[in-house]
Amino acid sequence: MKHERTFDPSYGTAVEVSDGIRRLTCENPSPFTFHGTNTYLIGQREIAVLDPGPENEAHIDAIVNAAGADAIKAILVSHTHMDHSPGARLLQARTGAPIIGCGPHRAARSLASGEVNTMDASADSDHVPDEELKAGDTFSLGDIVFEAIETPGHTANHLCFAVSATQILFSADHVMAWSTSIVAPPDGNMRDYMTSLERLLQRRETVYLPGHGGAVRDAHGYVEELKAHRMGRERSILDRLDDAPVSIPDLVLQIYDDLPPGLRPAAALSVFAHLEDLAERDLVSADPNVTLTASYRRPS
């Protein structure tokens, strides 16, 4: 599938992306955050700040300078990764605004015997919202009404936010134009991710404003491409399990033949997410059990 990677982060500047919506990109670029985390300032006299980002004082200063401390009335958080939620506590200390949105961090499943959660470092375990939103819950600020949409997959507590009476949905890390989302067990779950894509396809919104990179246009068409991409990856994995047991590192080398070595651990987690889903559907078997270090094959 084709991604859109043309993007100007305009660090320190609040860029208007729609009527009453501005984007501030934190200067925390990496292979996993693209140019950095997008923070959105929504509203005019009363402002909701969505995903204040990491613990980055310069970025918090930019948010407060762009919005005005007195105008910030709510801090929305989509999910608890370290590049999205810790800044909420810094911003709350500056403004007193309540933190609203996703609940505390949690894994999609329990750790298996002997398993280590390689995603621990990316999880914000200190996040506790003042108000937790569930599926279908709404939050109003002035004339703006936000609807919470539960979209687990990237994380178990991931939320998207729709702006009622518009075509706009804040898709955070669930759907991004620049890249596919990382789904890494045990924090993430591939079956949940695919179900969440289907959930978005049933909605009316056509423009997504993501957590990294530029806007997703023709959102439904793009989500269909994401589904097809994941299904193609699943077929690639199954095709390589016909003859003999295969390890996840070997699958990564076979499937991602041009991947930089530094990104292989993330690719391994993505393959693992697919294998976990396939094993639950009895399409693959693992020896000795479903872990990152197991060998996988088709059931005999």
Image (cartoon, grey):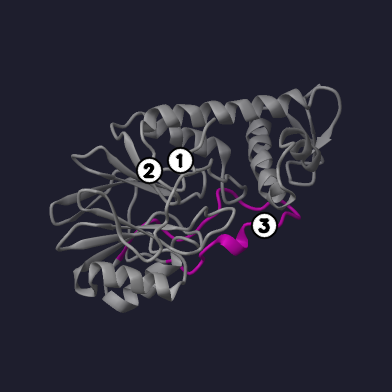
Q: Are marks 2 and 1 in contact (CB under 8 Å)?
A: yes
Q: Left of 119 or right of it: where is 207?
A: left
Under mark 1, the amino acid is: Ala
Q: Left of 285 or right of it: where is 120?
A: left
Magenta span of residues: 99-127
Name the foreground residue: 252 vs 75: 252
Q: Which residue is mark 1?
A: 177
- Distance of label 2 from label 1 (alpha carbons): 7 Å
Q: Position of residue 209 (x, y in %)?
A: 36, 46
Q: Which residue is mark 3?
A: 118
Image quarter where the C terminus lies is: top right
Q: Nearer the viewer, mark 3 or mark 1?
A: 1
Which quadrant of the figure has residue 252?
top right
**Magenta span main SS:** loop
Name the foreground residue: 6 vs 286: 6
What residue is at 36 percent from the left and 35 percent from the top? 217
Residue 244 shows up from this direction:
yes
Image quarter where the N terminus lies is: top right
Q: Is residue 103 magenta?
A: yes
Q: Left of 152 or right of it: where is 203?
A: left
Neighbourhood count class around disc 2 (C-alpha, 10 Å): few under 14, some 14–19, many 20 upward: many
Name the foreground residue: 109 vs 292: 292
Q: Which residue is mark 2?
A: 215
- Distance of label 2 from label 3 (alpha carbons): 30 Å
Neighbourhood count class around disc 3 (C-alpha, 10 Å): few under 14, some 14–19, many 20 upward: few
